[in-house]
Image (cartoon, coloured by chain):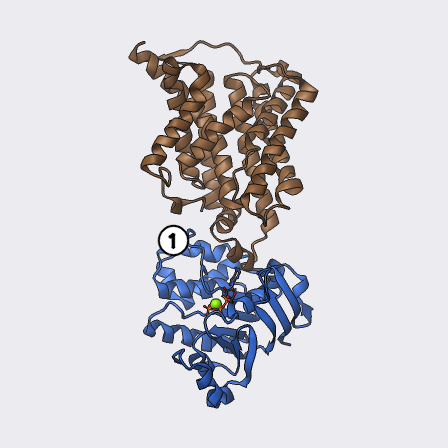
């Protein structure tokens, strides 16, 4: 059981943006994908979700070849995704954002669960998601993705636009996910921050892997500092 | 020319405006979700009007009840034509920029009109409507049929708003309009939702065509003639905003009618666009904020 990505090449029609990347996530583990601005992190995860026009390679989810499936079907196989931007339906209310998710099973009970887990959202049920604060919005984005009870969850820079206090709050949320048996693929520009909560990590530069391995080892590696020289590692 | 005369024109314009608004609602819904201006909406309305008329001719002995069946037939047939256009034409173009679908929709409009005129000819037709006297309300003289037409158009609009706001299908449509990629990764079935959208837009168009046929006459060009003010109304009310489309339709309907004594019948369509252009000069985004989309 794992989400296994191998030799993934992806792009938007011109030159390839992601140039042959491989990694694997097991349930209950966190894998960090780090790299500078424009290194292809988002393109990589979008390709896994089926949102990029040109993709080659292999993506295997618990034995299913995902690349043969459209995005909606990948979701049905247990792949969740919180995009980097535009990660809630801004013109739908908070409640509608959850109710619109096509999950099997008891939708009402799941919405209730989410509101229990994120009390701030429960208080703003009827508010348009576009009016939420940055932190609440991120909670809603998580809740929307969790409605599908994913086996694997891709988070694309979930803390990018948040204040320091909120970053801590979101990281606490992420740390709880493995306890639910979810395998997490966490994209972060700030490598150090991500590797501190991850089990494994991969560092991308210009669409290729430059380093990969257990998070603890990567944190020790001198090349990390070199790679991030001038990029202010966090 | 008296004030009462102008007021009567305004009332008549408001009823026509509701029909423009009905078609504009269909156009704006499709624009909000499928993201192109659907120029076939008018001719789908025309198909609806003709199928309603064909059915009524067959069951005219039923009296006024035949009109009810005609309306239902108009909506059903237009909905099916609209759905067929989605599956045969627009679905394949959904990944491209809107211009492809716009041009395809103009083509579809001409095909529909050709098919109808090939089988039914170019002659104008009328529904068999019982003759009634105009009601006098103060200085206004209103035909009962106009009251019916206006009331049915309003009721249909209320239904659309209820569907959009209160049903799971409407929620899915608004989610796709808001953010198609996020809708996809939320497992929202795109093809099924789009089918629902095209059925709804088609039914609205068919009703608009049938009601216009009741109020005036049924003719092959009726759809195109209704489409132009409907496009103006869509833009006037901020593209993608359903309530805006309806209000835009009423404003344009009234402006067209009230202007006829001054500019003559031939130029009334131009007046609709003049009103639209004037409003856009002051408010380039339309009367309502774009943020309030279908959405
Ligand atoms: N829709 C698109 N069409 C064409 N090129 C794109 C598109 N999206 C991204 N790119 C290009 O792909 C490259 C990688 O972008 P990507 O968003 O994957 O980087 P990233 O690592 O996620 O960066 P960031 O940390 O800023 O989010 C960039 O050069 C970008 O310009
Ligand atoms: Mg990114």
Q: Is residue A71 above or below residue B130?
A: below
**Residue B131 vs residue B123: left or right?**
left
Please state the total of marks drawn on the protein image.
1
Can the viewer see residue B196 in this picture? yes
Picture coordinates of residue B280 (x, y %)? 36, 35
Can the viewer see residue A113 in this picture? no
Quadrant (top left/top right/bottom left/bottom right) for the N terminus of chain B: top left
Residue holding disc 1: A128
Q: Is residue A73 above or below residue B126?
A: below
Residue A50: name its quadrant: bottom right
Picture coordinates of residue B17 (x, y %)? 43, 25
Chain with brown colouring: B
**Residue B113 vs residue B259: left or right?**
right
What kind of element bears circle 1?
loop
Picture coordinates of residue B192 (x, y %)? 61, 48
Furthest residue toward left: B3
Picture coordinates of residue B160 (x, y %)? 48, 38
* Residue at 62% in and 19% down: B56
Q: For this rendering, which residue is in front, A93 or A2?
A: A2
Chain with blue colouring: A
């Amino acid at each position: 059981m794992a989400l296994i990505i191998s030799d993934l090449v992806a792009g938007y029609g011109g030159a390839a943006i992601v140039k042959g990347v491989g990694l694997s996530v097991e349930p209950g583990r966190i894998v960090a994908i780090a790299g500078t601005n424009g290194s292809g992190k988002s393109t990589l995860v979008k390709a896994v979700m089926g949102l990029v026009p040109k993709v080659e390679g292999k993506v295997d989810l618990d034995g299913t070849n995902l690349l043969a499936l459209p995005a909606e079907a990948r979701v049905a196989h247990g792949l969740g995704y919180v995009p980097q931007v535009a990660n809630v339906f801004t013109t739908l209310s908070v409640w509608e954002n959850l109710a619109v998710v096509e999950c099997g099973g008891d939708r009402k009970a799941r919405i209730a669960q989410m509101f229990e887990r994120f009390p701030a959202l429960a208080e703003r049920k009827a508010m348009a998601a576009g009016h939420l604060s940055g932190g609440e919005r991120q909670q809603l984005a998580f809740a929307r993705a969790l409605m599908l009870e994913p086996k694997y969850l891709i988070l694309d820079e979930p803390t990018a636009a948040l204040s320091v206090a909120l970053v801590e709050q979101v990281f606490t949320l992420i740390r709880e996910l493995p306890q639910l048996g979810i395998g997490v693929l966490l994209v972060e520009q700030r490598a150090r921050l991500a590797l501190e909560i991850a089990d494994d990590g991969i560092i991308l530069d210009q669409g290729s892997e430059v380093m990969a391995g257990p998070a603890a080892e990567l944190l020790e590696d001198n090349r990390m500092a070199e790679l991030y020289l001038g990029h202010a590692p966090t | 020319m008296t004030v009462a005369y102008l007021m009567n024109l305004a009332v008549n314009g408001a009823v026509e405006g509701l029909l423009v608004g009905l078609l504009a609602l269909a156009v704006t819904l499709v624009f909000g979700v499928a993201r192109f201006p659907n120029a076939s909406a008018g001719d789908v309305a025309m198909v609806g009007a003709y199928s309603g008329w064909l059915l009524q001719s067959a069951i005219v002995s039923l009296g006024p009840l035949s009109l009810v069946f005609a309306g239902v037939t108009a909506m059903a047939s237009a909905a099916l034509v609209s759905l067929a256009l989605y599956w045969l034409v627009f679905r394949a173009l959904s990944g491209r920029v809107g211009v492809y679908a716009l041009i395809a929709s103009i083509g579809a409009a001409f095909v529909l009109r050709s098919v109808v005129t090939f089988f039914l000819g170019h002659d104008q037709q009328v529904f068999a409507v019982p003759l009634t006297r105009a009601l006098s309300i103060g200085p206004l003289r209103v035909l009962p049929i106009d009251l019916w037409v206006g009331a049915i158009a309003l009721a249909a609009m209320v239904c659309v708003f209820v569907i959009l706001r209160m049903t799971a299908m409407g929620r899915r449509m608004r989610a796709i309009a808001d953010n198609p990629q996020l809708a996809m990764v939320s497992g929202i079935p795109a093809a099924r939702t789009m089918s629902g959208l095209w059925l709804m837009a088609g039914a609205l168009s068919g009703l608009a065509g049938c009601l216009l046929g009741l109020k005036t006459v049924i003719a092959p060009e009726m759809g195109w003639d209704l489409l132009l003010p409907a496009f103006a109304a869509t833009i006037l009310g901020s593209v993608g905003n359903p309530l805006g489309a309806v209000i835009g339709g009423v404003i344009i309907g009234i402006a067209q009618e009230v202007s006829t004594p001054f500019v003559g019948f031939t130029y009334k369509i131009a007046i609709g666009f003049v009103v639209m252009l004037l409003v856009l000069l002051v408010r380039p985004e339309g009367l309502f904020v774009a943020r309030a989309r279908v959405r």
